[in-house]
């Protein structure tokens, strides 16, 4: 199973490209890239602070809950592009590699030092208020004094090789690949369903609109994840097969 921002939309987490999406007023490259952070770390931190604050008040919806139950039932981890941590919250059992979601693009609540590369989860980080002064000295710092950055994968950055290899292994071995709430635009994540299909898997897409994946999906279910997914997974339609 591969999920995108659409699975969290009904939890109140804005998607990237949809109506009211995060990137309505900025281009992704203006905010989610090393170049953006190098040229205006205050702007980038203000955006991530605003997202952290918003997401920290969101809870998993019925789609996350149904996916968590399915993941436990089939011992198949969910592959997610989301950095909001809602799949982990729904699972409620962090630390089990058989079911912990694979967060391909990292976590909003992770921080990494740009100097010593130390990385940790830090939900207590002092947020950078919207009106923050432009002085980079006011930004979150590591004990070593290095500037901290969000521990997410930005455009132009390589994904964690081990995570990507694990995802390829999962999708290459599945009989059904469920793709939920993603615009299927960003690679290499968007290439995973194609790997599944090339090895004989059935592709089922759940989305409120058509995407570039729709034409090659065996089934494209139109509707919001929080109603389509529970109906799909709770009936066991895909939990009997080796889903992914
Ligand atoms: C890399 C984290 C190389 C940060 C994000 C080919 C191969 C490899 C790379 C490329 C390639 N072509 C182009 C590239 C470069 C680039 C890319 O793909 N660009 C795109 C724009 C063309 N890829 C990269 O840069 C990647 N890195 O390739 O590195 C490399 C190798 C070696 C050394 C150096 C470099 C890194 C990409 C990761 C970027 N990080 N996020 C953050 O969150 O701040 S991307 C971000 O957008 C998400 O993580 C996600 O991956 C992506 C897509 O978002 P979605 O989740 O799909 O959300 P979106 O809003 O777009 O869509 C929501 C969907 O939900 C919609 O379809 C909507 O209809 C639907 N929906 C809405 N409501 C509901 C719903 N569905 C159901 N129910 C609802 N209620
Ligand atoms: Zn450091």
Image (cartoon, grey):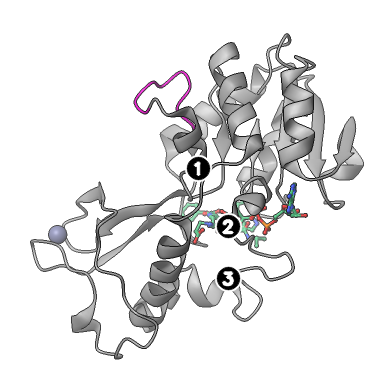
Q: CA distance from mark 1 to mark 3?
A: 22 Å
Residue 203 in the image: x percent, y percent? 80, 29
The residue positioned 8% from the left and 62% from the top of the image is 144
The residue positioned 77% from the left and 37% from the top of the image is 227
- Apparent side of residue 41 relative to residue 174 in the rendered image (left or right): left
Residue 176 in the image: x percent, y percent? 75, 21
The reply to whether the magenta stretch includes residue 104 is no
Q: Earlier in the sequence, mark 1 or mark 3?
A: 3
Q: Residue furthest top?
A: 240
The answer to whether any part of residue 198 appears in the image is no
Label 2: element kind: loop
Q: Is mark 3 within 8 Å of ligand 1?
A: yes
Mark 3 vs mark 2: give the one in front: 2
Looking at the image, is 64 positioned above or below residue 126?
above
Q: CA distance from mark 3 to mark 2?
A: 17 Å
Label 3: element kind: helix
Q: Which region of the structure is painted magenta?
A: 94-101
Disc 1 to disc 3: CB gap under 8 Å: no
Q: Earlier in the sequence, mark 2 or mark 1?
A: 2
Residue highlighted by disc 1: 86
Figure quadrant of residue 161: top left
Q: Which mark is residue 13?
A: 2
The residue positioned 52% from the left and 37% from the top of the image is 87
Between residue 123 and residue 159, name the one nearer to us.
Answer: 123
Q: Ligand 2: which quarter? A: bottom left
- Apparent side of residue 124 relative to residue 6 in the rendered image (left or right): left
Q: Is mark 1 within 8 Å of ligand 1?
A: no
Which SS does the magenta portion mostly show? loop
Q: How many marks?
A: 3
Figure quadrant of residue 126: bottom left
Residue highlighted by disc 3: 28
């Amino acid at each position: 199973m591969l999920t995108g921002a659409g699975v969290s939309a009904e939890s109140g987490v804005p998607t990237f490209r949809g109506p009211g999406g995060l990137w309505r007023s900025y281009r992704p490259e203006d905010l989610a890239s090393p170049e953006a952070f190098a040229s205006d770390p205050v702007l980038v931190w203000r955006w991530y602070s605003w997202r952290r604050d918003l997401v920290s008040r969101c809870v998993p919806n019925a789609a996350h809950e149904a996916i968590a139950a399915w993941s436990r039932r089939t011992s198949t981890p969910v592959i997610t592009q989301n950095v909001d941590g809602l799949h982990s919250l729904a699972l409620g059992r962090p630390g089990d590699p058989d079911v912990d979601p694979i967060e391909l693009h990292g976590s909003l609540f992770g921080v990494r030092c740009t100097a010593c590369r130390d990385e940790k989860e830090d939900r207590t980080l002092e947020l950078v208020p919207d009106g923050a002064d432009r002085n980079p000295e006011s930004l979150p710092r590591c004990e070593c004094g290095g500037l901290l950055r969000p521990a997410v994968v930005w455009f132009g950055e390589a994904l964690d090789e081990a995570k990507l290899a694990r995802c390829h292994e999962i999708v290459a071995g599945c009989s059904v690949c469920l793709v939920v709430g993603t615009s299927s635009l960003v690679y290499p994540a968007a290439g995973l369903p194609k790997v599944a299909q090339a090895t004989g898997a059935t592709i089922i897409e759940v989305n409120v609109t058509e995407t570039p994946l729709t034409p090659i999906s065996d089934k494209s279910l139109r509707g919001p994840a929080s109603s389509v997914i529970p109906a799909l997974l709770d009936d066991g339609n895909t939990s009997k097969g080796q889903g992914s």
